[in-house]
């Protein structure tokens, strides 16, 4: 990120993805002309992307599973690239640690999940082992991620203007959406800051109709807005995936504590060999050490913690991440497996 003003503007968009230029300018203490120019430059460069998504809980459309793969030495990137081509994969990363790559995969039915885990994943070349962890509760999602880019009072003011559910409330009933609703959601997925006028033209209805439908979906929790930015772009170059085992009696409390930490992009309760999984972004290795030793290490009921640092993000929020021109691809190589007796903490960093 080039300067402090751009960082503040990104913070404003994270707090309120569809904030007006006037609201952004006020939050970051600049003119509307400057705010407009900077927002346009950030989005045109692909540094920032505003998108929408239909909430899986509200619409009962799909569920998610984290898939961790161990690959043959030197083949982590190749496998991750193939995974990134799958439309079901919302995010894909190459890691270093106990596994070589990880993906969050959406599925629509048990049969769909069975086909993915039993047939498609094992069929990938060079995959040695697969672990899957189904998401059963989200304590924090990227929709609420708020690194320390803006003062807390500015964040609160912007969030107070939002209609969509930026926090992690779960709708009590399923939303009923028609063709127009799905059409609007699809357009906002591509451009979350599209104007009502433009959306109306693309849908063949009036801007008032589009706005009414969109706000109804937002108010019901069916449609959530999100600003997507790679953590490295806001000076948080250490991106890591954490997978924990916590005593079930402390699972909710541990999830809530992690969700409140500004370094946590998302954290969810899961099934399988780990019952708490998530992503964190920090400013340095020293920051990661502090997070592991003080935040993770002090979680109630912690039994095991595995931390794998991301070497490369291939896909985020359903779209391929553009790799910087000077980026180099570093692979995690073969490593011996380490026995983990019950109660131990295995940290792979």
Image (spheres, grey):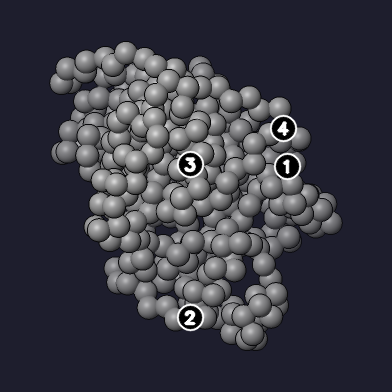
Q: Nearer the viewer, mark 4 or mark 2?
A: 4
Q: Badge 2 local density, few (<14 within 10 Å), some, or many (20+)? A: few
Find numbered disc 1 in the image and state the secondary structure of the residue it sits on.
Answer: helix
Q: Depth check: 123 or 31 in front? A: 123
Please give left or right for residue 292 compared with residue 250 in the image. Answer: right
Height in image: 184 above or below 14? below
Residue positioned 61% across, 56% down in the render: 50
Q: Locate residue 33, reporting x and y percent.
A: 84, 56
Closer to the N terminus: mark 3 or mark 1? 1
Q: CA distance from mark 4 to mark 2?
A: 40 Å
Mark 1 and 2 residues: CB-CB less than 8 Å, in contact?
no
Please give left or right for residue 26 compared with residue 141 in the image. Answer: right
Closer to the N terminus: mark 1 or mark 4? 1
Please give left or right for residue 298 compared with residue 155 in the image. Answer: left
Q: Badge 1 local density, few (<14 within 10 Å), some, or many (20+)? A: some
Please give left or right for residue 306 compared with residue 203 in the image. Answer: left
- Where's the N terminus, which quadrant? top right
Q: Locate residue 166, reporting x and y percent.
A: 47, 57
Q: Nearer the viewer, mark 1 or mark 4?
A: 4
Q: Depth check: 314 or 83 in front? A: 83
Label annotation for residue 179 = 2
Label annotation for residue 325 = 4
């Amino acid at each position: 990120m080039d300067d402090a003003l751009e960082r503040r503007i990104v913070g404003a968009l994270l707090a309120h993805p569809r904030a007006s230029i006037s609201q952004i300018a006020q939050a970051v203490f600049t003119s509307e002309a400057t705010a407009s120019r900077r927002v346009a430059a950030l989005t045109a460069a692909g540094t920032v992307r505003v998108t929408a998504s239909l909430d899986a809980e509200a619409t009962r459309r799909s569920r998610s599973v984290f898939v961790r793969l161990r690959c043959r030495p030197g083949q982590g990137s190749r496998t991750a690239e193939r995974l990134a081509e799958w439309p079901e994969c919302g995010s894909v990363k190459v890691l270093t640690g106990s596994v070589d790559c990880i993906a969050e995969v959406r599925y629509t039915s048990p049969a769909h999940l069975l086909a993915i885990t039993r047939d498609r994943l094992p069929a990938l070349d060079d995959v040695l082992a697969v672990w899957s962890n189904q998401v059963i509760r989200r304590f924090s999602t990227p929709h609420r991620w708020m690194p320390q880019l803006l003062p807390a009072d500015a964040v609160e003011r912007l969030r107070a203007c939002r209609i969509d559910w930026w926090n992690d409330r779960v709708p009590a009933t399923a939303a009923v959406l028609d063709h127009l609703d799905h059409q609007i959601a699809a357009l906002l997925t591509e451009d979350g800051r599209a104007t009502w006028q433009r959306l109306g033209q693309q849908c063949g209805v009036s801007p008032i109709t589009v706005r009414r439908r969109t706000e109804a979906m937002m108010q019901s929790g069916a449609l959530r807005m999100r600003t997507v930015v790679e953590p490295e772009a806001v000076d948080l170059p250490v991106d890591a995936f954490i997978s924990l085992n916590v005593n079930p009696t402390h699972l909710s409390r541990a999830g809530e504590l992690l969700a409140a930490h500004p370094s946590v992009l998302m954290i969810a309760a899961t099934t399988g060999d780990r019952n708490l999984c998530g992503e964190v972004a920090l400013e340095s290795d020293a920051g990661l050490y502090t997070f592991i030793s003080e935040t993770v290490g002090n979680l109630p009921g912690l039994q095991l913690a595995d931390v794998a640092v991301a070497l490369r993000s291939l896909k985020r929020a359903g779209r391929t991440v553009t790799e910087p021109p000077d980026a180099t691809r570093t692979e995690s190589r073969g490593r011996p497996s380490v026995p983990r007796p019950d109660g131990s903490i295995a940290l792979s960093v």
